[in-house]
Amino acid sequence: MSDLLVGLPPVIELHDVGKTYASGSLEVEALRGVSLTIRRGELVAIVGPSGSGKSTLMHIIGCLDVPTRGAFHLSGEDVASLDEDRLAEVRNRHIGFVFQQFNLLPYMSAARNVELPLVYAEVEPADRRERARRALAQVGLADRAEHRPGELSGGQQQRVAIARALVTEPDLILADEPTGNLDSTSSGDVLDLLAQLNREGRTIVLITHEHDVAARADRIVQIRDGLLLEAVPA
């Protein structure tokens, strides 16, 4: 770990987090007392089958949902104390999302797609363009900045999505099944890129059901029936 990161709070601290959903007259316990710490600079994979609770855990870590009970601190900040406006700001500024479906706007260029989080953050246009250019260069797509998603391969589209996740300089990159729509070659390229970003100091959490993807992480956390199993080295 870099000396610059020593003394900073963990990016993620979950303590005895539970999440219960109402389903008609029934209550479904999606998470049952989850405790987890992810420190700055880690590359962690959260692995579990469908229905294990990993999507619920991802939503809580990404500030897209809140726990029913327990405590969640993101970079030292108590998420339960945040109002909706502050939660939206935290999601935009402190978490970079990468999804299986890429979620790129088809009528916008790669550069404009990458700029979007900065638009929401009310960054000045000239600064937005420069930061988007740097982010695309970081993922090896400087020469594709003006191409629309339909003019790019699946692997290139996912790299644009990673550039979009990077552009706000977030504390955390949260990647949900980032290789799910890619062939094996493109999958390897995307995982290599995430590993390189991690070596540069980025904190990355992979949500996956694929054990070969999880094996690229420093640490694997298994979830089943809403409970974390022992975290193991990759």
Image (cartoon, grey):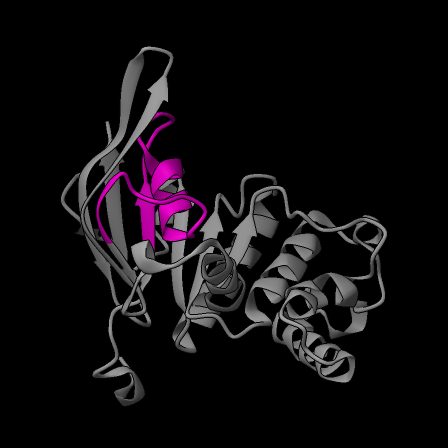
213 or 27, nearer to the observer: 27
Report the side of 192 relative to 148 (left or right).
left
Residue segment shown in magenta: 44-71
Q: From this viewpoint, which residue is outermost toward the top?
A: 25
Q: Residue 58 occupies which quadrant of the picture?
A: top left
Instruction: Indicate the position of residue 208 as horizontal and vertical percent values.
Output: 41, 41
151 or 81, nearer to the observer: 81
Q: Quadrant of the N terminus?
A: bottom left
Q: Residue 145 occupies which quadrant of the picture?
A: bottom right
Please tell me whether residue 62 belongs to the stretch shown in magenta.
Answer: yes
Instruction: Indicate the position of residue 184 as horizontal and vertical percent values.
Output: 56, 44
Residue shown at the point (70%, 63%) measured from the top left: 116
Instruction: Indicate the position of residue 74 as horizontal and vertical percent values.
Output: 32, 63
216 or 202, nearer to the observer: 202
Observer able to see residue 213: no
Instruction: Indicate the position of residue 34 as horizontal and vertical percent values.
Output: 19, 43
Residue shown at the point (41%, 70%) measured from the top left: 171
Report the side of 189 relative to 32 (left or right).
right
Q: Residue 82 occupies which quadrant of the picture?
A: bottom left
Please tell me whether residue 95 belongs to the stretch shown in magenta.
Answer: no
163 or 58, nearer to the observer: 58
Residue shown at the point (58%, 61%) measured from the top left: 162
Observer able to see residue 43: yes
Q: Indicate whether 102 appears above or below 125.
A: above
Q: Indicate whether 116 appears above or below 220.
A: below
